[in-house]
Amino acid sequence: MQTLNTTLLIIGGGPGGYVTAIRAGQLGIPTILVESQSLGGTCLNIGCIPSKALIHVAEQFHQTQHHSQHSALGISVAAPTLDISKSVEWKDGIVDRLTTGVAALLKKNKVQVINGWAKIIDGKTVEVGDTRIQCEHLVLATGSTSVNLPILPIGGPIISSTEALAPTSVPKRLVVVGGGYIGLELGIAYRKLGAEVSVVEAQDRILPAYDAELTQPVHEALKQLGVKLYLKHSVLGFDGTLQVRDPEGETLNLETDQVLVAVGRKPNTQGFNLEALNLDMNGSAIRIDSRCQTSMRNVYAIGDVSGEPMLAHRAMAQGEMVAELISGKSREFNPTAIAAVCFTDPELVVVGKTPDEAKAAGLDCIVASFPFAANGRAMTLESKSGFVRVVARRDNHVIVGWQAVGVGVSELSTAFAQSLEMGARLEDIGGTIHAHPTLGEAVQEAALRALGHALHL
């Protein structure tokens, strides 16, 4: 068995792991990165990027179908057809370019990448096949995995998001189990690709992690698309049809060709002998402090394996910080807010505190919304549903939260996060000249409305 020595060893090559490695390389820290599959992790390979690619394909196909039937824009085309294999090939091309780019960045920054399955021996020793690696600092960036339902084992007609993102054909009927962001993003995409889609959700509404006012436009859009919702329904099993129990306790049999199980994700703590470290845990996640340090000295955990919020951009920010800590810099992970984005149609963004969260925190706040129905740019995009909402302290007008639902609002998340990190007040946003015509004007108008003088409402 050969032995390698390094200052930093990272297990996991997803967004958290590879960013840690790149930043460490920039800082001159000898670094080894171990990845068992493809660089980029879930996000680049079977998550964020391929799902957004499939969503784009679905939207383009849906719009072309719309133009072939009736279009107020004056566009007339023949009924479109879909070659899903070419769509998947295009999606795979994007993934390949991104993962190749990650590999090039790691090489550029002199990071040694070892492909294989890591086995932890102790806090400074990891084995990968017949190679033993000794390190001074160990970073655990193993990500998360889909939560499986024992009564719906993956295989055949029962699929996870991984299989849903690499279809060989579009099913005639699809039932999505789980009305969270993963289930709805993919469910809407498949509906636009031509499948008859039903969503089964145990809670009394879709996207239960978001407030009801924010999710209402998505609910309305689902009805317009013809997606059937089975709310407050629980899954019993599958034997060719999906059996569910309705709120009255009656059993329904849902005919379907495929069942997509999308009930969430859990930290990936299995398969690499994490038990050898005997780390303090926070439920199913590894417990960390404000510097991402675990209960063992010089062992760090970042990203999904350290718990919620399970977001790639959180993992990246944590990884950059950890690399700088190891280099001797003084850092702490204490963001004012981390944006959460849901790529449904319409899109949702939540940054900072919602009205209910502000109230629960004992804050007396002003809450104001500006509808996209009064925004010129939204009208030109054929989308008037949704709004921008601001939450600000009543005493000093410091903004504590932003929410938005509407077309393209994911792109507003950066402005929202920056305003919170910079401690902006309503007057700062209201007094900033926003380009016209843009969706961003609704951000300014929401702030002006909170101040009592919206201009276009």
Image (cartoon, rainbow, N blue to C red):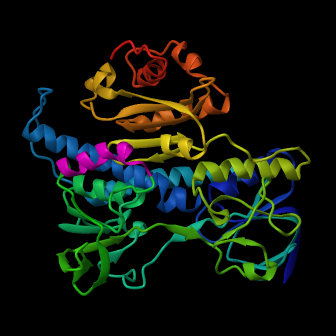
Q: Quadrant of residue 276?
A: bottom right
Q: Residue 273 magenta-drawn? A: no
Q: Quadrant of residue 273?
A: bottom right
In the displayed structure, would residue 224 be above or below residue 230? above
Q: Residue at x 80, y 46 (%)?
A: 332
Would you say residue 114 is visible in this rendering? yes
Q: Residue 218 magenta-drawn? A: yes
150 to the left or right of 428:
left
In the rendered image, the quadrant that contains the N terminus is: bottom right
302 to the left or right of 420:
right
Q: Residue at x 61, y 72 (%)?
A: 268
4 to the left or right of 396:
right
In the rendered image, the quadrant that contains the C terminus is: top left
149 to the left or right of 417:
left
Residue 302: where, in percent of width, then height?
70, 59
Q: Nearer the viewer, residue 182 or 231?
A: 231
Majority secondary structure in the magenta region: helix
Q: Which residues are magenta?
A: 210-224
Residue 103: where, in percent of width, then height?
65, 54
Would you say residue 129 is visible in this rendering? no
Residue 128: where, in percent of width, then height?
75, 78
In the displayed structure, would residue 368 be above or below residue 259? above
Residue 456: where, in percent of width, then height?
34, 14
Q: Residue at x 35, y 53 (%)?
A: 54
In the displayed structure, would residue 131 be above or below residue 329? below
Q: Nearer the viewer, residue 211 or 217?
A: 211
Q: Residue at x 59, y 24 (%)?
A: 397
Q: Nearer the viewer, residue 215 or 12?
A: 215
